[in-house]
């Protein structure tokens, strides 16, 4: 018997959409400061082929996370350690594929949870909009994650080297992707999806629509990749530049397109990489495709 016969078609579709989201985000261009299909942006240790290898290595984890969400019978919150176990193994596969380069660790966390949440929502027959149902499941799965992972730092420091995320929490109060997920991915709801939808309705290609969504997300995201590498003043400047571009029409106007191309060159030279925003673009693509698939 074919081993895949026991895997529901829903799970296969969700896993495939998650992998597709990874590749779409990596390929869309021009993505200011990010690796895309034309250049390596602010990075000198990775390119589009690194991301293809990385995404391919992480693909099986997307199916496993979706299957875990589909099969889970306990409370949503109890699903998180199961997904983290899947993610830890996938992370090792990613590093093996990229020769130790961290390409998509944050995205693995985000899309793994979203894939599980979507599968669980469909299995449970959640009423209403699949987007809202999935995002609520994301919140449920990650309930207390900020307090659990970072809250203890307010009282005592661990007897080890702090992670980048822990340092950002202590120095800036930034909760990163944990906080974004725990809040129900508000930037995806207020920027990512509206910008993607407006661009597609405006007749843009999926490439251009994803860049339009990226700039919209950059205008509001507390991007911890930028915050970690460059500090708060650079992050605020990035947000202001993105807001100005969106005010000029983003990818929907020639002026907006020109500014985005210029920004790509500027951020590449200054080594500014909005990696947190990039992850949310992939999340936006995922949730939008889920909407039209189920």
Image (tube, rainbow, N blue to C red):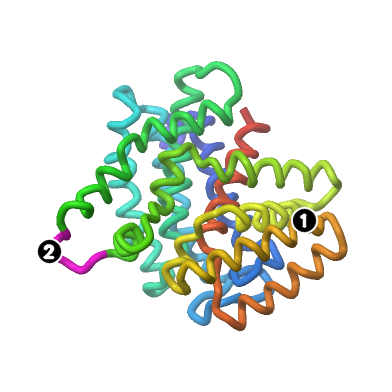
- Queried whether the magenta region covers residue 159, the answer comes back as yes
Quadrant in which the C terminus appears: top right
Secondary structure at badge 2 equals loop
The residue indicated by pointer 2 is 159
Q: Residue at x 33, y 65 (%)?
A: 164
Nearer the camera: disc 2 or disc 1: 1
In-front residue for pair 153/7: 153
Crowding near the residue tagged with mark 2, few <14, some 14–19, many ≥20 C-alpha atoms within 10 Å: few
Q: Which residue is drawn at 47% across and 29% down?
A: 136
In-front residue for pair 33/14: 33
Horizontal side, residue 252 vs residue 289: left or right? right
* Rendered location of residue 289, percent (x, y): 64, 39
Q: What stretch is highlighted in magenta?
A: 157-162
The image quadrant that residue 124 belongs to is top left
Secondary structure at badge 1 equals helix
The image quadrant that residue 260 belongs to is bottom right
């Amino acid at each position: 018997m074919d081993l895949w016969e026991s895997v529901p078609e829903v799970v296969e579709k969700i896993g495939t959409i998650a992998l597709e989201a990874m590749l779409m985000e990596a390929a869309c261009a021009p993505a200011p400061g990010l690796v895309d299909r034309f250049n390596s942006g602010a990075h000198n240790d990775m390119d589009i082929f690194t991301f293809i290898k990385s995404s391919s290595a992480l693909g099986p984890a997307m199916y496993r996370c979706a299957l875990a969400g589909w099969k889970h019978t306990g409370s949503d919150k109890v699903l998180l350690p199961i997904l983290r176990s899947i993610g830890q193994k996938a992370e090792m596969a990613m590093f093996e594929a990229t020769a130790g380069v961290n390409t998509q660790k944050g995205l693995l966390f985000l899309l793994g949870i979203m894939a599980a949440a979507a599968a669980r929502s469909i299995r449970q027959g959640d009423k209403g909009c699949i987007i809202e149902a999935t995002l609520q499941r994301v919140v449920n799965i990650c309930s207390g994650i900020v307090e659990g992972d970072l809250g203890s730092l307010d009282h005592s420091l661990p007897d080890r080297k702090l992670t980048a995320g822990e340092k950002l929490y202590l120095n800036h109060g930034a909760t990163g992707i944990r906080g974004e997920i725990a809040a129900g991915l508000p930037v995806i709801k207020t920027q990512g999806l509206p910008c993607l939808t407006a661009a597609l309705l405006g007749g843009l290609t999926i490439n251009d629509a994803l860049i339009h969504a990226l700039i919209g997300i950059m205008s509001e995201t507390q991007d911890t990749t930028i915050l970690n590498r460059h500090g708060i003043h650079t992050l605020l400047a990035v947000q202001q530049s993105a807001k100005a571009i969106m005010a000029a029409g983003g990818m929907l106007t020639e002026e907006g397109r020109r500014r985005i191309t210029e920004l790509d060159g500027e951020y590449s030279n200054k080594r500014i990489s909005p990696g947190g925003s990039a992850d949310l673009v992939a999340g936006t693509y995922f949730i939008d495709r889920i909407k039209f698939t189920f």
